[in-house]
Amino acid sequence: MTKPVTRTRFLATYNYPGSFFPESTTKEITAPTFATAVAEGPDEAGYFKKDGWYSVEIISKTEKMFTSGDDIAWVPEDTERVLRAVVGTKTHYSEIEDDERNRILISNIKSNSKDGFGVETRRGNWQIADDYDLVVDPEDA
């Protein structure tokens, strides 16, 4: 009896700000680390620029090989989130200027975060800090 053949792939989904919802692109990377996601990020061409994304989610995907005659199919067995990182400046809502322009932002951070922190991403949009495993300073990305 032959042992089933499996493989593990690492996929990185890079998020870009969109008009109403984030845009994203996904590509396979060689290792499940933030450094690898940065090094092997999207090409410089078009909308999905290498340094234009504000967050990345890395998953590990285990697949099992099935064969039928000459055909080979890889069927997903297990998917696990490895890392969710955002690039930006972590800021407590109390540090944001409390004026008419920022009231909704402050309210959203207070209401949707566990610890009162948001992240102003390198692309200028805001995210809730505790939605991510890692907040990376833009100079380190």
Image: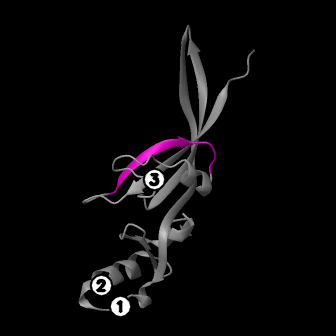
Q: Nearer the viewer, residue 49 or 30?
A: 49
Magenta stretch in the rendered image: 22-32
Q: Which residue is mark 2?
A: 102
Q: Amino acid at mark 3?
A: Lys
Q: Residue at point 35% right, 69% down? A: 125
Instruction: Mark 3 vs mark 2: give the one in front.
Output: 3
Residue 106, picture quadrant: bottom left
* Three-letter code for the amino acid on which mark 1 is drawn: Glu
Left of 113 or right of it: where is 70?
right
Which residue appears farthest toward the right when viewing the image?
1
Q: Decide if residue 138 is on the left or right side of residue 97.
A: right
**Residue at label 3?**
50
Up/down of 66 relative to 136, above or below: above
CA distance separating discs 2 and 1: 7 Å
Q: CA distance from mark 1 to mark 3?
A: 32 Å
Instruction: Determine the residue positioned at 40% across, 52% down.
Output: 49
Which residue does the numbered mark 1 point to in the structure image?
A: 97
Q: Tell me if label 1 and label 3 are in contact, CB under 8 Å.
A: no
Which dot, 1 or 3, sits closer to the camera?
3
Residue drawn at (57%, 51%), measured in percent from left and top?
A: 39
Characterize the local packing of mark 2: few (<14), some (14-19) or many (20 or more) Cα atoms within 10 angstroms.
Answer: few
